Image: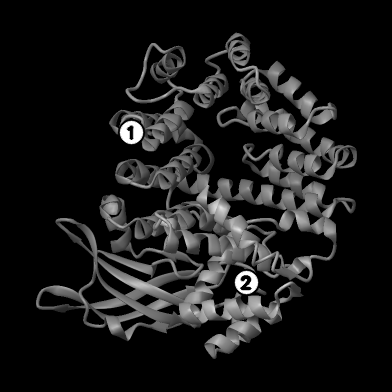
């Protein structure tokens, strides 16, 4: 809430006082508002860990968006007004804000702020362009930002950073003989960027993982030596991009990864924890860590996560590891392990706390075996309470939808809950619950409403689309995969833009992970009449299926 308020307040300067000349500089509005909101939170409110929340949520969004085949530079090419809609995305908001944080580190924070003041004063009540912003920053910092702009604002993709080192023995201990940071270009690109980064050396002690040394340096080209670390004891955790100054994926060396697996929860500071969690999630999505190993990492360390936002994200990612990125043969065991961990977390959390609610929602969503489903039903009827957990209207609907998806309740329970909550929101929750039931007739009716009934408002059909595709229902959903492509052109022609885009994105057969989905998508994309916004969403959906196909094979091989 604070972030949203501060974001909109920032638009008084970035968007209102100074407005971009054309939509290609949309980032001058949105990236700045996102950056300044977090900056203000961390500097001037009680939410001093705002940059951790940013790393957990916004940057995860940006990393995902920037690895899609449809990624684009922060300064995007916007040929017409219709193209604007799909650029209100993770690049324009989250990556842009991340790159502004890197720019502040690159030129110096004081110089960065002075440049912003000059930019706003010089162009107040007028339109501005990228060159105007760069001129103000160059004058304030004395640095030529032409190359920086080309690297960061006008080129897409995310780099990967990792530490490489040689060691030698000194009095029975391993010390660094040579250290360098290796930079790798984005996939299918050659871009290397200039990064201002910090590296941190963390040692395992009796009070946790403690940072012993921090070095800040400029990483340029493919290899950057770090002579300041020569002779230092090899740490238990070598954290590249400590303090999260740059926008880059990081990889952990084998010793550091082992430390993270065993002791990630021993990092007392929330930001380095977030960086380690993100590194492991990136490795999972990239097929470098089997999804089942990521699940074990989460279950083994999440209990000590103090940030409720991080807890929620990690539980969602663990769910994706089980159902989307992991070997389907491991689903039953993995899903039950996650449910047991969530149940334990619910019981162990402070009564009435946000942590307890996050754990409870995860347990409810992951319940599949009879014992767990019975407990969830008990939460709904009040026979199995958890001390301090308030089962309000929203949580009741979460329970009903989860039970409906698992096939544990039918229309009678959904109708009774809708009668209990006759609000518009209750009607939408009920529609989602109905669509989520594992019943062919139910799926057929949901499809009819979404595809044929153009009289329904988007608020309602969005809920139906959200309930339609559920993990574990692939056999029921498979027949609709071909029908999706047959209905796509009609949806574009018969509905207004928001409705058509919602259908294209949310009904794409993302859970039918196989080569046939990829072939169907490729076949449709061969058509000459595919509108650009639809083409983009299809490419993104296909990329998700292809990624899941790769990670499942890797997880299966890790038996």
Image quarter hosting the C terminus? top left
Question: What distance separates the C-alpha of mark 1 from that of mark 2?
Answer: 43 Å
Instruction: Give percent across and percent down for residue 495.
Output: 86, 38
Q: Residue at x 68, y 24 (%)?
A: 424
Badge 2 is on which residue? Answer: 189
Q: Extreme left residue here?
A: 171
Relative to 137, is 6 above or below? above
Q: Does label 1 or label 2 sit earlier along the sequence?
A: 2
Disc number lying in front (1 or 2): 1
Instruction: Give percent across and percent down for residue 45.
Output: 43, 57
Relative to 135, is 503 above or below? above
In the rendered structure, the answer to whether residue 367 lies left or right of residue 434 reads left
Instruction: Give percent across and percent down for residue 420.
Output: 58, 13
Q: Residue at x 45, y 54 (%)?
A: 53
Number of disc labels: 2
Relative to 51, is 354 above or below? above
Q: Residue at x 41, y 64 (%)?
A: 251
Q: Residue at x 36, y 34 (%)?
A: 353
Indicate the quadrant where residue 84 lies.
bottom right
In the rendered structure, the answer to whether residue 471 lies left or right of residue 492 reads left
Instruction: Give percent across and percent down for residue 387.
Output: 32, 23
Badge 1 is on which residue? Answer: 345
């Amino acid at each position: 809430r604070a972030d949203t308020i501060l974001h909109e307040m920032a638009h008084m300067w970035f968007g209102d006082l100074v407005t971009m000349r054309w939509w290609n500089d949309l980032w001058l509005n949105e990236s700045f508002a996102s950056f300044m909101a977090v900056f203000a939170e961390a500097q001037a409110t009680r939410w001093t860990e705002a940059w951790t929340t940013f790393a957990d949520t916004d940057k995860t969004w940006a990393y995902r968006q920037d690895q899609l085949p449809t990624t684009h530079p922060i300064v995007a090419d916007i040929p017409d007004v219709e193209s604007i809609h799909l650029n209100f995305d993770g690049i324009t908001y989250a990556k842009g804000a991340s790159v502004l944080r890197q720019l502040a580190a690159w030129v110096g924070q004081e110089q960065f702020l002075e440049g912003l003041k000059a930019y706003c004063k010089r162009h107040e009540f007028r339109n501005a362009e990228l060159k105007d912003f760069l001129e103000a920053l160059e004058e304030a910092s004395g640095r030529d930002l032409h190359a920086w702009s080309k690297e960061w604002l006008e080129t897409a993709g995310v780099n990967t950073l990792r530490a490489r080192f040689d060691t030698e023995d000194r009095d029975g201990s391993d010390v660094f003989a040579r250290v360098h940071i290796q930079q790798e270009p984005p996939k299918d690109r050659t871009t290397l960027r200039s990064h201002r980064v910090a590296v941190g050396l963390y040692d395992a002690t009796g009070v946790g993982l403690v940072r012993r040394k921090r070095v800040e340096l400029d990483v340029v080209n493919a290899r950057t030596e770090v002579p300041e670390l020569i002779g230092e004891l090899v740490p238990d955790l070598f954290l590249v991009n400590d303090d999260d100054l740059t926008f880059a994926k990081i990889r952990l060396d084998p010793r550091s990864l082992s430390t993270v697996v065993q002791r990630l929860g021993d990092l007392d500071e929330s930001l380095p924890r977030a960086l380690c969690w993100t590194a492991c999630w990136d490795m999972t999505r990239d097929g470098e860590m089997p999804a089942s190993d990521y699940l074990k990492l989460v279950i083994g360390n999440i209990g000590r996560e103090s940030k409720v936002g991080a807890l929620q994200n990690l539980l969602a990612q663990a769910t994706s590891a089980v159902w989307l990125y992991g070997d389907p043969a491991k689903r039953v065991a993995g899903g039950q392990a996650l449910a047991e961990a969530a149940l334990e977390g619910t019981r162990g959390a402070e009564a009435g706390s946000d942590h307890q609610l996050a754990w409870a929602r995860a347990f409810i969503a992951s319940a599949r075996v009879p014992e767990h489903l019975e407990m969830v039903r008990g939460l709904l009827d009040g026979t199995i309470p958890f001390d301090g957990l308030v089962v309000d209207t929203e949580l009741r609907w979460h329970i009903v939808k989860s039970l409906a998806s698992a096939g544990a309740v039918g229309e009678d329970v959904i109708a009774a809950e809708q009668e209990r909550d006759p609000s518009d929101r209750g009607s939408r929750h009920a529609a989602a619950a109905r669509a989520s039931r594992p019943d062919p007739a139910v799926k057929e009716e949901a499809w009819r409403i979404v595809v044929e009934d153009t009289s329904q408002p988007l608020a309602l059909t969005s809920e139906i689309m959200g309930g339609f595709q559920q993990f574990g229902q692939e056999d029921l959903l498979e027949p609709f995969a071909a029908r999706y492509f047959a209905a796509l052109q009609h949806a574009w022609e018969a509905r207004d833009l928001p409705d058509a885009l919602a259908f294209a994105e949310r009904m794409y057969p993302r859970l039918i992970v196989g080569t046939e989905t990829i072939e169907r998508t490729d076949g449709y994309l061969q058509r000459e009449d595919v509108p650009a916004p639809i083409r983009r969403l299809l490419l993104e959906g296909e990329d998700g299926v292809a990624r899941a196909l790769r990670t499942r094979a890797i997880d299966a091989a890790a038996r």
